Image (cartoon, grey):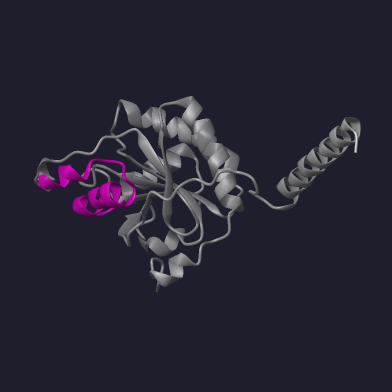
Amino acid sequence: MNKKKVFYYVGFFALLTVVFYFGLTKAIPGFGKVKLPILSNVQPFHFVNQDGKQIDERAVQGKVYVAEYFFTTCQSICPIMNKNLVAVYEEFKNEEGFMILSHTCDPETDSAAQLKHYSDSMKVDNKRWMFVTGRKDSLYNSARNSYLLDDPKNNLTSIDQQFLHTQFMALVDKSGKVRKIYDGLKKDELEELKRDIRDLLAEPVSQERFSNNMFGS
């Protein structure tokens, strides 16, 4: 076999491989993409939403959601974060499998009624963007132990002396696993967040969630 034929066959099979791989990326959602790592598991929680209803982890069962912390009287980073999140909300508000879960850092001020007023002012769908309050220690434990949005060492301080104020937000998959943390003040990271939401919406629900009873009834 001469060199020309060798190059011909090598080139042919290389092209065939590329075409085959390209076909798989079109036929199989998520094929060829590097999956986001699993950073932590969301632990069971019990809060009250802006409609005064008790909610737990079943409210986000099977959904891709963004978890953030803010407070309604904040005059610094919170309005910027939530303005940036509005763009995310607008892009995915018609996706049944998507939610935003905003936790207050200041439950003494942010009652369900206060959160309802805030939510109404933003003109968002309460089913797609939920605002929650509850016990301060429960809210802060979720921020640190579930969503990795604050240093767990801060738990060593008396809860009365703690105040959580962070621009970071977590992306959670359908199985209740935190997959990535984003800076809510950086537009480039918000664009990453949108792309990652699309990828996670295409991912199947992991069966591991049933084995560890994360969303058990």
What segment carries the magenta color? 133-156
Q: Position of residue 137 (x, y in %)?
A: 19, 52
Q: Is residue 155 above or below residue 78?
A: below
Q: Is residue 182 above or below residue 80?
A: below
**Count of numbered circles in the view:** 0
One can see residue 93 in this view: no
Question: Would you say 52 lies left or right of 96 here?
Answer: left
Question: Would you say 93 lies left or right of 165 here?
Answer: right
Q: Position of residue 62 (x, y in %)?
A: 51, 61
Q: Position of residue 141 (x, y in %)?
A: 24, 51
Residue 179 lies in magenta, yes or no? no
Q: Position of residue 105 (x, y in %)?
A: 26, 42
One can see residue 104 in this view: yes
| Quadrant the C terminus occupies | bottom left
Q: Quadrant of residue 33?
A: top right
Question: Would you say 65 lies left or right of 23 here?
Answer: left
| Quadrant the N terminus occupies | top right
Residue in front for this viewpoint, 181 or 21: 21
Identity of the residue drawn at 36% across and 36% down = 168
Identity of the residue drawn at 45% across and 31% down = 83
Question: Would you say 108 lies left or right of 190 here?
Answer: left
Residue in front for this viewpoint, 13 or 133: 13
Identity of the residue drawn at 78% across and 47% down = 20
Identity of the residue drawn at 57% across and 38% down = 195
- Magenta-colored segment: predominant secondary structure: helix
Residue in front for this viewpoint, 13 or 155: 13
Q: Residue furthest front?
A: 1
Q: Residue furthest bottom?
A: 217
